[in-house]
Image (cartoon, rainbow, N blue to C red):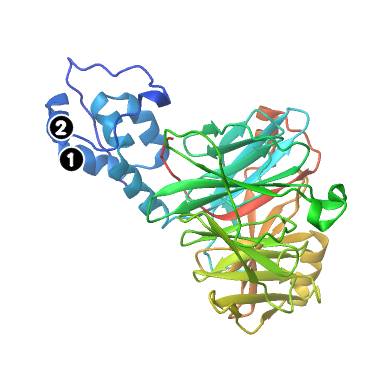
């Protein structure tokens, strides 16, 4: 049974009006000064109570008093909340709806039940009113990078805050944006790569490729141009994973770019010899803290393949790991056109249905590459009648994107 707390504020301290982002106080909290705000609740008890609450009530309780606002917005409290949140990772699910011109963002628990088949309930976290914002990379510490034409934004589904970065000037080129985090400097940075991709460039040496970096949460709100170690241009591919301050993404089919978030340097490593690092059936993922490449349906639709980068400096990949898909799952995986999307906290790789249809179950498949076992979880609460009635999403099929490792983060920029 959970604890129930009764909060009583001093009568001479009325809750302040809702505050704008620009009113965020300094990350350091002057507790000696803050004690004067309340006489009924000891400060250490206030801190203990707030530290036990989930994100949604915490965000509401910012309006209780200036003290509570300062506590909840303080860096120490935000960092502690994120640390706890990482012990409860979730799946982030998103789809866009043409009729309502909106993008919907949900989250659901990462499944850890040993049952072969079970059900999890999704929660509607955020609606982006601009349909054209697109999400192609997995969330990082609860933050999601979105792109829209020449615009790049970072959104936090927990706080429902969207930070739009200064526009870039692609000049007709394709634009790719990826979010990284430097754990040493505690900074979030967005890498933007612009180039003529595909048939627009004519030749490989005429793609006019440029790299820019933007640091979030600093006074210098502008893009900085950076240079790569080699002048050899590359074809950018979708997909990304950030591990220990390094963003990895596929370039071509055999190479992987390595962007060091702290030094802002880009280098390249070779992918596994027997695998297209990023293709329709392959994805770069994190597996037990290391970079890995997961492939499904590339050689044989009945097997899942995985390579793990054992030594980044020597560019040594492990021997191929395979997992046979039992016949009872093989047909389902083929019919639902599943997609490899990553790895969850139980060290299982996940495969996800590509589309969302109101008349069909939306499922996530969990594959244990060691025990050679596949199980399934049905995700409720997305395509049900109640949500369709409220948001008018209709019954048409929609492309569904699903990313593992999403966590709640109460940080504001």
Specify the quadrant of the image occupied by residue 328: bottom right
Q: Which sits in the foreground, 347 or 117?
A: 347
**As displayed, is residue 50 above or below residue 350?**
above
Q: Position of residue 204 (x, y in %)?
A: 81, 57
Give the residue drawn at x 60%, y 71%.
Answer: 292
Q: Position of residue 195 (x, y in %)?
A: 74, 47
Quarter of the picture containing the C terminus is: top left
User: Secondary structure under badge 2?
Assistant: loop
Specify the quadrant of the image occupied by residue 63: top left
- The extreme bottom residue here reads 319
Q: Position of residue 382 (x, y in %)?
A: 65, 42
Give the residue drawn at x 78%, y 45%.
Answer: 359
Give the residue drawn at x 33%, y 35%.
Answer: 73
Can you see residue 122? no
Give the residue drawn at x 75%, y 67%.
Answer: 253
Alpha-carbon distance for marks 2 and 1?
7 Å
Q: Horizontally, is 129 left or right of 88 in the view?
A: right
Q: Position of residue 31 (x, y in %)?
A: 16, 35
Q: Which mark is residue 45?
A: 1
Q: Which sits in the foreground, 141 or 126?
A: 141
User: Secondary structure under badge 1?
Assistant: helix
Q: Which residue is mark 2?
A: 41
**As displayed, is residue 268 above or below residue 85?**
below
Q: Which sits in the foreground, 350 or 25?
A: 25
Can you see residue 78? yes
Q: Are marks 2 and 1 in contact (CB under 8 Å)?
A: yes
Q: Which sits in the foreground, 364 or 19?
A: 19
Q: Residues within 10 Å of mark 1 (few under 14, many from 20)?
A: few
Q: Residues within 10 Å of mark 2 (few under 14, many from 20)?
A: some
Q: Which mark is residue 219?
A: none
Q: Horizontally, is 43 left or right of 50 in the view?
A: left
């Amino acid at each position: 049974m959970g604890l129930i707390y009764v909060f009583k504020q001093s009568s001479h301290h009325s809750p302040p009006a809702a505050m704008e982002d620009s009113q965020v106080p300094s990350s350091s909290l002057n507790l000696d000064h803050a004690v004067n705000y309340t006489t009924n609740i000891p400060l250490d008890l206030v801190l203990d109570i707030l530290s036990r609450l989930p994100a949604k009530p915490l965000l509401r309780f910012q309006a209780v008093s200036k003290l509570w606002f300062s506590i909840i917005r303080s860096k120490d409290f935000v960092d502690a909340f994120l640390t706890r949140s990482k012990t409860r990772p979730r799946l982030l699910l998103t789809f866009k709806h043409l009729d309502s011109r909106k993008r919907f963002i949900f989250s659901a628990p990462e499944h850890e039940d040993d049952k072969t088949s079970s059900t999890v309930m999704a929660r509607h976290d955020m609606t982006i009113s601009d349909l054209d914002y697109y999400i192609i990379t997995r969330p990082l510490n609860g933050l999601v990078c979105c792109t829209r034409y020449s615009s790049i934004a970072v959104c936090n589904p927990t706080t429902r805050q969207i930070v739009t970065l200064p526009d870039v000037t692609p000049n007709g080129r394709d634009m790719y944006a990826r979010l990284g985090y430097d754990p040493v400097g505690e900074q979030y940075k967005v890498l933007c790569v612009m180039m003529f991709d595909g048939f627009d460039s004519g030749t490989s040496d005429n793609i006019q490729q440029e790299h820019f970096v933007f640091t979030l949460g600093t006074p210098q709100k502008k893009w900085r141009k950076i240079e790569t170690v080699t002048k050899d241009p590359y074809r950018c591919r979708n997909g990304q994973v950030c591990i220990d301050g390094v963003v990895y993404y596929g370039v071509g089919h055999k190479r992987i770019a390595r962007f060091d978030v702290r030094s802002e340097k880009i280098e390249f490593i070779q992918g596994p010899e027997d695998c297209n690092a990023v293709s329709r059936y392959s994805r770069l993922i994190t597996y037990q803290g290391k970079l890995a490449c997961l492939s499904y349906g590339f050689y044989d639709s009945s097997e899942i393949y995985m390579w793990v980068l054992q030594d980044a400096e020597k560019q040594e990949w492990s021997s191929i790991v395979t997992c046979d898909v039992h016949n009872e799952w093989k047909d389902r995986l083929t019919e639902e056109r599943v997609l490899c999307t990553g790895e969850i906290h139980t060290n299982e790789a996940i495969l996800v249905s590509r589309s969302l249809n109101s008349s069909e179950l939306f499922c996530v498949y969990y594959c244990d590459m060691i025990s050679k076992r596949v199980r399934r979880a049905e995700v409720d609460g997305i395509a049900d009648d109640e949500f369709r009635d409220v948001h008018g999403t209709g019954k048409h099929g929609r492309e569904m994107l699903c990313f593992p490792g999403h966590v709640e983060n109460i940080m504001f920029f």
